[in-house]
Amino acid sequence: MADKPSDLVQGTLDMLILKTLALEPMHGYGIAVRLEQMSKGVFRLNAGSLFVAFHRLQRDGLIRSEWKATENSRRAKYYVLTDHGRKRLNSETREWGRQVAAIARILETS
Amino acid sequence: MSVLRNISSGLRSLFRKEQVSQELDEELNGFLEMAAKEKMKQGMSRIDALRAVRLERGNLEVTKEVVRAAGWESFVETLWQDLRHGQRVLCKSPGFAAVAVITLALGIGATTAIFSVVNAVLLRPLAMEEPAHVVFVQETWQGIFPGLSVGNFADLKRESTSFAELCASNNASFNLEARELPERVDGEIATPNYFTTFGVQPIAGRVFTAEEDKPGQARVVVISERLWRTRLHGDPSIVGQLIRINGLPTTVVGIMPRSFDPLLSNSNLWVPAAYTAEQLADHDSHYLNVMARLKPGTSQGQAQSELNVIARRLQQQYPMDNQDRGFRLQPLTTALLGDQRLSLRMMLAAVGVLLLIACANIANLQLARSRTRQKEIALRAALGASPNRIVRQLLAENLVLGIAGGVVGVFLAYWAVAWIIAHGPGEIPRLDQSRIDAGTLAFGCAVALLSGFLFGLAPALRSASTRLSEVFKSSTGISGGSRDRVRSLLVVGEVSLALILMAGAGLLIRSALLVSHLDPGFDAANVVVGRVGLPDPGYHDPAVARQTFERMTTAAATLPGVESVAVVSRAPLAGGGSSNGLLAEGKALDPGNLVNSQLQIISPNYLSTARVPLKAGRDFAPQDTRDHTLVTIVNETLARTMWPGENPIGKRFACCESGPKGHMDPVWHEVVGMVADVRAWGLDRQVQPEFYMPLAQMPPSAWDWIGRTMDLVVRTRGGVIPIHELQSTVASVAPAVPIYRLSTMQQKISSTLERSHFDTFLLAIFATTALLLSSVGIYGVLSYMVAQRTRDIGIRMALGASQAQIVCDVLGFGVRLAGIGLAIGLLAALAATRLLSSLLYGVRPTDAVTFAAVSLILLVVALIASYLPARRATRVDPIVALRYE
């Protein structure tokens, strides 16, 4: 499953990134690691899809970025969820829940 | 919000490329470092850790490319790169670039120039409020479309409900005396709502009031800004002042803006119509221009049906005057500019064809080049360029060509438009307003880009689809069959397009030659013509008017170098005229039996002065006065129409006035002579039935029909034209009366032909250019073919083929291409030239002589174009050829 996430529906990766950033601002590598931890290793993210997603989310105004020092005092670009992004995360989470529930119902009945 | 952010962020990446790229580098390097550190904690060496990260996360260089390509700005950037690359490639082959740019500039320049003319004349809205709602009303009668009679106009105005405004005017010219010499000025006699119909306000003063539009009121005039600025020196206090028009003091009440010329007739002044009760009851004189503004929500169709109903009622009410008479509505734009459409569209189609040929030529050159560039392209593909990117890059190269051609073309168009304005026929309305403006520039740019795309796409797709293995395999370089087929097809297309243009130009040239050899019906050499209009107030009495003209001719005849002088109500080719319905003796008094015929009122010596040949009977004599039998002379066409196969001399017809017993009492005129047809309306126009009436026998009311205006016809003994002497003679007989439109008959004839000569000239230029371009096409394909087949030719010659055989082969191929193109072109031309039929005189649109001639010219040119490559083929040295590559 290592490369699969890039095949996911585009919005899915975006939503997961937003969710990760909902807790605290993080740099790119941190986001990747966090996603892998939370998915218990199901997702392994390719750097290409990850950074394109950052680029896209920034252009859409859902996240913004700032340069800060890491805990190891390196300079890294931190991504921060904007208000707009937070709203989008909420609505997308709801929508996702609805769809998953619906799909699950269909799969159970047939 | 998000769009704005997107644009600003994109612009930042474009213009602060370094910084953005550096940030991305730093971020990705950080990512790599952190991931590697993690691995190293698990005990890997740094090198192993970095490799493991790359395996897991993908190559970071690729990631950079992917991120960079994610935004719109990357498209702009690659486009820019492609354009710059294209420009560099073109600079490396300046010969090709120059040929392509010149070819393209010719096409784009011609197209843009003609488009700016079409734009100025046809497309630009008329200078009035909502011109789409303004319609032009005419009567319909026996297939012709006369103006309205005042009576019909008044009835229409009273009864129709479809129009917000309905106004009328008729063109007239006036003797204007303002400060300097008297001058003749064109203007209109208009109803007071004329100005509100078009929704245009005066720039100073006011327009007429309804009160001023009544007979016998104080005289007022509205003048044009043009007249005000030129003749009246822009006098700011002119409104309210008196100027003398037709000898009478008249108050200037307003000035209309320069752009106001709703009927495109160069009107310089307007006076109120003030129709008298007598005029309002007249349903028989059809001369009014009637314009109307449709009520909001009323369609032209609805208005037309209403007019049909009113027309039927008028037919019943005035059976004598209105039998078979209907009304016709047209958008004003169509009525004014409809005549221009055909020839302007023809020009636009012609330049479009020219542009297509130019594009085909460049496509051909590009295809040839793409073969020599195959390896370059294959190499790029091998290095990972996608077919998409290659197509884009090749297209960008063509775009550069298109832009360069467009820039040069627009300069050409500037020059061409100036030339057209300077040399174009004066009769095309608004031609002088043609210019290269934002609209035409946009058109030119669009044409340039489109053509760049058009001629670039085929070669680009072809190159991109090239399979690599083939390119590297076929280093001996023959093959390429299908590509040659495309090139041959392009040449065939060029030839057939060129033939269409040549056929059109050929037909017009043949028609112009025929017209120039036509006999005008009189001796036009050494004849000078000028118009004289006597003002109504001083010359109201018919006897005074007639004597004034008689004294004028007598005085002018004594001038040195003058052989004889006569007057005629309308000299040939002077335009305009009045027509009458004639009833042959013996026919029932029914409008259906009337023959419509032009009337010429002449002094007795006119026919001998103009040298119109007398075919039968006698000329007018001084004793033909109103005390004697009313006599007339007819032209051959009228004699043929009225009394087919009979001798017209001694026959009688009724016309022009009614006898003492009232409206239905005919007045008979006896035919005493028959003269040759005079082509009075232009050499290339149909001759109309025409009859002549002696000045001394004209009905008194006829002075009003002709506006007391006659043409002085002066036959000189050659040599200098006595213009000043004529002017002072006229002024000595009738003070303050100018003689105007003074020119020789030859000048009048050539000015009526100006238009068709201009069209012919332009089309001939286009056709010649098309022929040259397509011969360049043939030459290009054949030279290329010879170059490609050097080896084949060498082998054949080594095997004993003679030079003649080789020449025959190459020539044969060229002629075959031309022949196929010719056949297709002939078929297309047969269909296309039908559209020209109304511009042709005496030539059918399928004229075999013309078609044979242009085909022959084309074949000869094709042979010449093929001969040069053929000769080169015979110079192939078999040894060298076999060693080649």
Image (tube, coloured by chain):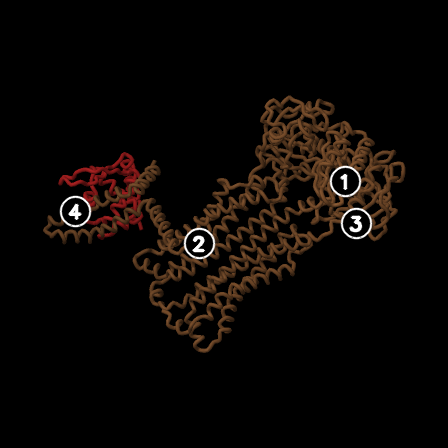
Chain colours: A red, B brown
Residue B380 lies in quadrant: bottom left
**Are both tags, 2 and 4, on one chain?**
yes
Label 1 sits on a secondary structure element that is: loop
Disc nearest the viewer among 1 and 3: 1
- The numbered mark at residue B33 is 4
For the residues beneath circles 1 and 2, the answer to whether they share a chain is yes
- Quarter containing the N terminus of chain B: top left
Q: Residue at x 34, y 67 (%)?
A: B473
Residue at mark 1: B560
Residue type pointed to by label 3: Ala
Amino acid type, residue under disc 1 in the picture: Pro
Left or right? Give the position of B58 relative to B874. left
A34 vs B141, left or right, is: left
Specify the amino acid type for callout 4. Glu
Protein chain holding label 1: B
| A18 relative to B353, above or below | above
Disc 2 is attached to a residue of which chain?
A: B
Tell me which corner region of the image, top left, top right, bottom left or bottom right, holds residue B373: bottom left
Rendered view: B202 above or below B758 = above
Q: CA distance from mark 1 to mark 4?
A: 112 Å
- Element marked by disc 4: helix
Q: Earlier in the sequence, mark 2 or mark 3?
A: 2
Which mark is drawn over residue B98?
2
- Residue at the disc numbered 3: B676
Residue B720 image label: none
| Residues at marks 2 and 4 touching, judged by CB atoms closer than 8 Å | no
**Mark 1 → mark 2, Cα distance in angstroms:** 63 Å
- The amino acid type of the residue labelled 2 equals Ala
Closer to the camera, B598 or B324? B598
